[in-house]
C-alpha cells in the first residue's frame, strides 16, 4: 500500500535495549531498564538557520542530514548506554567509566558512525591499497576501480557479518528490526499492536544500511571520472570525493524510497534491502513493545509538546518517564 502523501515521515535508530524515533521537531527514545521499567529520553531538533537552508539544496541536504543525525543519535546512544543496565536510583553509584560497558558502547557506535565517517576513510582507503597490490594482474583504470569496489564490499559485508554474531550486537540489530517494523506498520495504517507489528517486514527502503551500500555503488561510478594514477593522487581524490559520494548516495536513497511502490522500479532499492538482512534481526515481543512505546511517545510529543513526557503511554506501574532534556 502506498503511503498517504499527508503522512509525516519518521525515522529511527536502534540503541542499547531501546529505540529512538525522530519526527519533524522532536526525537524520543524509550529503553527497557534493568528492573524491566521503561524510561524515556527527549531531545528537540534544533536547526541552525544555515542548516535549514542547506537542507533544501539537493546533494548538500544529505550531508547536513547525516551530520545532524549523528549528533542527535550519539546523545540518545549515550543515554541508553548509561542507564540500560542500572537499577533506577542507582545511577550515581556506578563508576563513570566501566570498561566492559565502554567496549559495548564503542561496538554499537561503530555500527552507526562507521556508515559515513569512519567507514568512508577506512573502507574507502584500504581497498585502494589492496587493489593496487593486484595492479600487475589487473592493470588499467577500469580493472582497478572494479577491484577496489569489490574489496570495499567484501570488507563491509565481512565486518557486518562478524559483529552480527556477537550476542550484544545481535540484540541491537533486533531492536533495529523492531524499529523498521513499527515504521512499516505506521506507514501502512496498521494499528500499533505487538501482533500487527510482528507481521511486518524488518526491512525498509529508507534505512541507513541501504545508504552504506549505495555509497559503495555510487563511489564506483564517480571514480571513473577522476584519475587513478599515480597512487598518491588516487588516495587524495578518494578523500576529497567523500562528501560528493555521500551527497549523491543520499539522493539515490531518497529516489529508491520514492519509487518503491512502482513495480518496474522498486527493484532499485533491493541491494540495500539485502544488506539489511545482516543489519536487522527478527525482534522478540518485548523488544517490539519498547519500539511501540518509543514511537507512540514521539507522536504524543509532536502533537502536545514535552508535557506528553509527564505521563506514560500505557497504564503500567513499571513504566517511567523523564522530563525533556
Image (cartoon, helix red, strand yellow):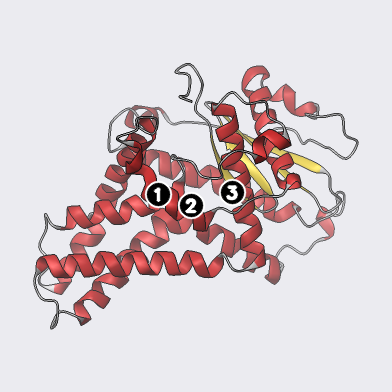
**How far is disc 2 from disc 1 in space, using C-alphas?**
6 Å
**How far is disc 2 from disc 3 in space, using C-alphas?**
10 Å
Q: Nearer the viewer, residue 133 or 66?
A: 133
Q: Is residue 215 left or right of residue 224?
A: right
Figure quadrant of residue 95: bottom right
Query: What secondary structure is found at the residue carrying circle 2?
Result: helix
Q: Residue at x 36, y 35 (%)?
A: 254
**How far is disc 3 from disc 1 in space, using C-alphas?**
15 Å
Vertically, is 272 above or below 1? below
Q: Is residue 13 left or right of residue 197?
A: left
Q: Nearer the viewer, residue 17 or 57?
A: 17
Label 3–label 1 contact, CB within 8 A: no
Residue 204's x, y, as percent? 48, 41
Q: Sort mark 2 into few (<14), some (14-19) or many (20+) by Cα contacts within 10 Å.
A: many
Q: Which mark is residue 176?
A: 3
Query: What secondary structure is found at the residue carrying circle 3?
Result: helix
Nearest to N terminus: mark 3 or mark 1: 3
Query: What secondary structure is found at the residue carrying circle 1?
Result: helix
Nearest to N terminus: mark 2 or mark 3: 3
Q: Nearer the viewer, residue 8 or 95?
A: 8
Query: Does residue 199 appear in this view?
Result: yes
Q: Residue at x 68, y 23 (%)?
A: 300
Label 2–label 3 contact, CB within 8 A: no
Residue 133's x, y, as percent? 21, 82
Q: Sort mark 3 into few (<14), some (14-19) or many (20+) by Cα contacts within 10 Å.
A: many
The residue indicated by pointer 1 is: 272
Give the number of the mark in front: 3 or 1.
1
The residue indicated by pointer 2 is: 276
Vertically, is 296 above or below 134? above
Residue 291's x, y, as percent? 67, 40
Q: Sort mark 1 into few (<14), some (14-19) or many (20+) by Cα contacts within 10 Å.
A: many
Label 2–label 1 contact, CB within 8 A: yes
Amino acid at each position: 500500500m502506498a503511503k498517504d502523501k499527508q503522512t509525516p515521515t519518521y525515522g529511527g535508530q536502534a540503541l542499547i535495549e531501546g529505540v529512538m524515533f525522530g519526527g519533524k521537531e522532536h526525537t524520543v527514545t524509550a529503553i527497557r531498564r534493568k528492573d524491566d521499567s521503561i524510561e524515556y529520553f527527549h531531545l528537540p531538533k534544533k536547526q541552525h538557520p544555515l542548516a535549514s537552508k542547506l537542507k533544501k539544496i539537493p546533494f548538500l541536504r544529505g550531508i547536513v542530514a547525516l551530520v545532524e543525525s549523528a549528533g542527535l543519535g550519539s546523545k540518545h546512544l549515550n543515554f541508553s548506554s548509561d542507564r540500560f543496565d542500572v537499577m533506577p536510583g542507582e545511577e550515581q553509584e556506578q563508576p563513570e567509566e566501566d570498561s566492559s560497558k565502554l567496549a559495548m558502547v564503542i561496538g554499537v557506535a561503530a555500527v552507526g558512525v562507521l556508515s559515513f565517517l569512519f567507514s568512508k576513510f577506512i573502507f574507502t582507503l584500504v581497498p585502494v591499497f589492496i587493489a593496487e597490490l593486484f595492479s600487475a594482474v589487473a592493470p588499467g583504470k577500469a580493472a582497478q576501480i572494479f577491484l577496489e569496489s569489490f574489496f570495499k564490499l567484501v570488507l563491509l559485508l565481512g565486518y557486518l557479518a562478524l559483529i552480527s554474531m556477537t550476542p550484544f550486537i545481535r540484540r541491537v540489530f533486533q531492536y533495529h528490526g523492531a524499529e523498521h517494523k513499527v515504521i512499516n506498520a505506521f506507514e501502512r495504517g496498521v494499528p500499533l499492536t505487538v501482533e500487527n507489528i510482528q507481521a511486518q517486514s524488518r526491512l525498509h527502503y529508507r534505512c541507513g544500511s541501504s545508504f552504506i551500500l549505495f555509497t559503495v555503488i555510487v563511489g564506483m561510478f564517480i571514480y571513473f571520472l577522476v584519475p587513478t594514477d599515480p597512487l598518491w593522487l588516487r588516495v587524495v581524490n578518494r578523500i576529497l570525493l567523500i562528501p560528493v559520494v555521500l551527497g549523491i548516495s543520499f539522493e539515490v536513497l531518497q529516489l529508491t524510497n520514492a519509487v518503491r511502490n512502482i513495480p518496474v522500479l522498486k527493484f532499485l532499492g533491493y541491494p540495500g534491502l539485502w544488506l539489511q538482512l545482516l543489519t536487522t534481526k527478527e525482534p522478540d515481543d518485548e523488544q517490539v513493545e519498547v519500539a511501540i512505546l518509543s514511537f507512540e511517545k514521539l507522536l504524543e510529543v509532536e502533537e502536545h509538546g514535552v508535557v506528553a513526557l509527564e505521563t506514560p503511554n500505557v497504564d503500567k506501574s513499571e513504566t517511567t518517564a523523564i522530563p525533556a532534556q
